[in-house]
Every structure is written in structure tokens, then in C-alpha cells.
Image (spheres, rainbow, N blue to C red):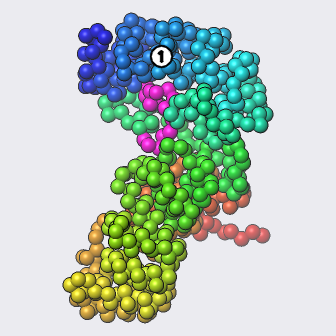
Amino acid sequence: MSSSIARYLAKTAFKLSDCLSALEGRALPTNLGNRVARLCVINGLRKHLDFALSAEVDELCSVEGQEIFARARNAGLIMNDRVPDADLMHNNAWHPYCIWSPRVAREDTYRQLATVFPDMRYQVGRACAVGGYSQLYNELGLLPDPCIAEEARENTAGPAAEGARKIYEQIMASPVRFAVMNDYDRTVQLHTPKACARLNADTAVLASLEERQVFEEYFHSPIDSPWIYFNITEDQGIGDHTVKVKPHDLTDSEIALFTSPLPEDLPTMHKDLLILTAAFEGNLDRYARLRRPGQTINYELHCVLPGIYKSFAMAIWLERNPDILELIASSWHPREIKTLRAAIHARRIMNNDIHRLLDMKNVVPDDEIPYWIWYPTIPAEWALLKLAEARPNMRPQCARACMAGGMRDAYTEIMDMCDDDGKPVAVDKYLMLEAQTCPGHEFFEADMLRRKAEQGLDDLQAIADGDEEWKDNIPWRQGDVGSPYLLSRLQDSCHSVVRAGEDWGMYEGLGSDLGRVRLYISSSPEARARAETRGGVMHLEDEDLVVD
């Protein structure tokens, strides 16, 4: 390694002109230790042949630990119809994954590449699906792979469409398919492919690569977000200008998937709203099938939380898969792992399974103690009494659960339990709210007012923790509500369930709302058309809904 390359790699400062020079394929930046500069180099190498052939790039690619540049260089050569020499590809770490974007090479180039480097034949097969090279695909003798099938299926426009259709039909005619390519981690399982694979919208098809984010010093690419799933070009979507892809409006056939058993092969690439809906409803089979392995989507946490409360199966499956649980939590904030664990404890309590909360050897930490332990299932009186006795800090929620269930005797016994200082459970505004709104509220409200006076509490707000305002909810009214707003179209977007700026809710401050999705799915095409005439949203309360 020359001293100049060593100096470049050591410099981490951002320099606008250097990044632009790399994107345009004019020269290597002098600050290759800078993350943004490195991404610009990768992008430039994939697009500009002269840059990929330059001596300084060749030297950089030979440096140990800089294999990512060698892959980008080789991808650029291939897409510009130059099969790399053997000395540029002798290391498998130098083999690029995506060799079909931003440019598709000629069919003969890919044919020669597969002949000289047979380990690249599946990348070549994928390029055939993009370029419509059905003849070359047949020559490769590949196992039928879902990624190649989905790439071919989505290639429906232009001169490549007919060849892509033939590739798709050939793959789908096979009784068994094999998961060889993995777009999430850019691996190709040549020797140990998983059999019985199915099409599951886990492919970064060509159209998904259109989104770009302009480079800047504090570059936050779409790929930076934990809910953006693919980086098959390894440049994290960087570019010299921003390109935003509009959310997809779901078609009638895609809408039908919400109310039908899922087919063996998913017929769409748009499954994010399907994932969020399955998570929210606690539908474990659909969620486990659809979720993106090793990834999360935006607001998945907000939907998984209510799903845990609703579904014992969802709760236990996540408990048995702590890696998935931690992944979901970290997509928002690492501390949310405790929120998820608390939800699982809550679901167990609602099943009257309280032994873990009573285990004094393996004590559940206080910050994993759940609050909503009575929605959507109210525990038995004996379970609430035992919890309140063993865990004094759970007495307020146990008392609320008793009120929600109309359990007067258990409520009274819990409220009379004293702490080490001989003081009974303190009245707070959340207990008072439950007393005022629960069935049989006359008894509970009167008792709360009596206790409030006895405890000398004038201002309940003053004793409430501002970080716990989410407790100021009535689960039976706000846990899973309908919507009066009918949309004219439904988008495959997280904002169909969590509106921008409204990601709060009853689940320790987190929330989501499936009401608009359900209303749209259950509405007639005529009603949706009327919503279109109202500017895209129709408030049903203001409409004459009588059908003559």
C-alpha cells in the first residue's frame, strides 16, 4: 500500500468536493476514512468505467480490509461489458452481488462471466431476469430461486419483459424451489441452499433501487434506518440528488390478501402493511411467515406490542426468540426491550400464569413490571390478590384490574394493603379515572373519593409521573378502536397504521391504529370512490349512509 492511500484511509473529515468527484468518477477522495466519502466511491465505481480502471482504484482494491471497493470496481467493469481478469476476482470477497444496476450488461458479457467464474452464475441468472435473457438463463442450469423469480415477475415493461416472463414461468413450473440468493445479507448459498423455498417478497427488485438520498456531511440514507431492508449495491442509496419513491397504492388483488389465507407464493412485493396488520392482530402464523428476517419495518414495534397483549401464542413465540425480540426493540430504542418483556409478562398474568412474578430467586426487575394486566383479558381475583401481596409496586394496576372486572372484595383488600410504613395504596389520578369509568363506578368512585380525603390528597395530578401519561387511558375504549375516516386508497406504508407525529399510545407511550385499514378493506368500491371525491378522505359521521 502506497503512502498516499494510507494517508487517504486515515483521514475522516468530510469534504464536499472530494465526495462529488468520487460520485462523478473523476478521482478518489483524499478522505477515505470518511463514511460518506467511501459510499460515494462505491457509487462512482459502479457507474464510471474509467474510474473503475484507474491505477489508484486498483491499488485501493488490493488493500486488505477494503474488499468492498473491489466488489464495486468489479461490478462496474461487468456492467460496462468487461469481464474482470482472474487476478481481480481470485478472492471470493471480491465477487460483487448486484451486477445489474444501474446498468445491465450485454447477454454475451454475462455468458462469459458465468463461464470464467462459475461461482457467479446465480448473480448472472438474476441479471438475466432483469435483462430478459431467457436463453442464457436456460444455459446456466440453475436451481429455481425465489429471488430470481420475483425479479423476473416484476419485470413487466420494456423489451426485457417477454424474456423475464419466460424465466418466471420456468421457475414457477418447478415443483420445488431453493433459497440460493439472499438479498438481506447479500449471500449466495451455492452448496447448502434451503429447499422448499417460496416467493415471499424478500427480494430487492430493480424498481426498489430507484430511491436515492443526496450525499451530505451528516448523511442519513434510507438504508441507515433499521426498517430499510436492502443494500445490494452496497452504496446505501447515496447519490448526487434525492429520489423519493411514492408509497404503493395497494391493488384489489393485494387488498384481498388481508382477508384470505396467504397463498404458498406471495403474489406481490408489497407486504409491509400485511406485516404490521398481522403483528397488531397477534396473528402469529401470518407474522412469522411475512416478517423480514434479520430486519424490522417502520413502526413494527408499535404493532407488535398490542399483538402480544392480544395473543398468547405471539407472546410466547417472541419470548422463545429473544434475538427477534431484541431486534424489534432496537429498531426504536434499546430500552424498549423492557417494554416488550413487560407485555409478555402481562399476557402471562392475563392467563393467570403469575409464577414468574412470584419467583423470588429470579426476580423480574421493576422496570419490566407490566401495567396493563387486564386488557384484553381480566385475570382471576386470586391471581390479582397474590400479585398485589407479593409485588407491592403492582398494587395500583391490580386495583384497576379489579375495578375493570367489578371485583369489589378483591379491590378493597388490595387497596387496604399497607407498605412497610403502614400506609395503604395511595390514590392516584389513574385509579380515580378507572373508578369513574368502570362498570359499577358508583361504588368505586365513592370509595376512591373517601380514600383520597383520608389521605389528604387535594391534587392527584401533582403525584403523577409526567412520563406515565399513557396510563391515562381506558383500555376497553382506546386499546383497539375503529375509525370514522374512510380513505380513497390504501397504501403499503407504515403511515396507514401510525400517522406522522401520532406514534403515541397506551402501550407505555407507544401506539398504533388499525381502524382506517379495517374500514377501507371492509368498504365497497363505491364508498371508496365517494371518498376520492371528498379529497381522498371521507368522514362517515358527516355522510348520509342510507342506501335506497
Question: Can residue 192 be seen from the camera position used here?
Answer: yes
Q: Does residue 396 show up?
A: no
- What's the residue at 52%, 36% (across, down)? 184
Q: Position of residue 60 (x, y in %)?
A: 36, 13
| Quadrant assignment, res 514 | bottom right
Q: How many marks?
A: 1
Q: Is residue 101 magenta?
A: no
| Stretch of the chain drawn in magenta | 225-240
Instruction: Give the quarter of the image for residue 36.
Output: top left
Task: Indicate left or right for 231 with 22 as reference.
Answer: right
Quadrant in the rendering for residue 248: top right
Residue 162 drawn at (x, y percent): 75, 24
Judge whether residue 230 is colored magenta.
Answer: yes
Front one among 524 and 305? 305
Q: Looking at the picture, does residue 408 appear above or below residue 225?
A: below
Whole-percent x and y of residue 110? 63, 14
Residue lying furthest front in this view? Answer: 361
* Nearest to the observer: residue 511 or residue 243: 511
Which sits in the foreground, 361 or 177? 361
Which image quarter is the C terminus in?
A: bottom right
Element type at mark 1: loop
- Does 118 sit above or below residue 449? above
Q: Quadrant of the N terminus?
A: top left
Judged left or right of residue 427, residue 86 is right
Q: In the image, what residue type sits under mark 1?
A: Asn
Q: Position of residue 345 (x, y in %)?
A: 44, 67
Residue drawn at x 41%, y 29% as measured from the top left: 214
Residue at x 44%, y 31% (from the top left corner): 236
Which residue is label 1 attached to?
91
Q: Residue at x 68, y 44 (%)?
A: 266
Q: Residues within 10 Å of mark 1 (few under 14, many from 20)?
A: few
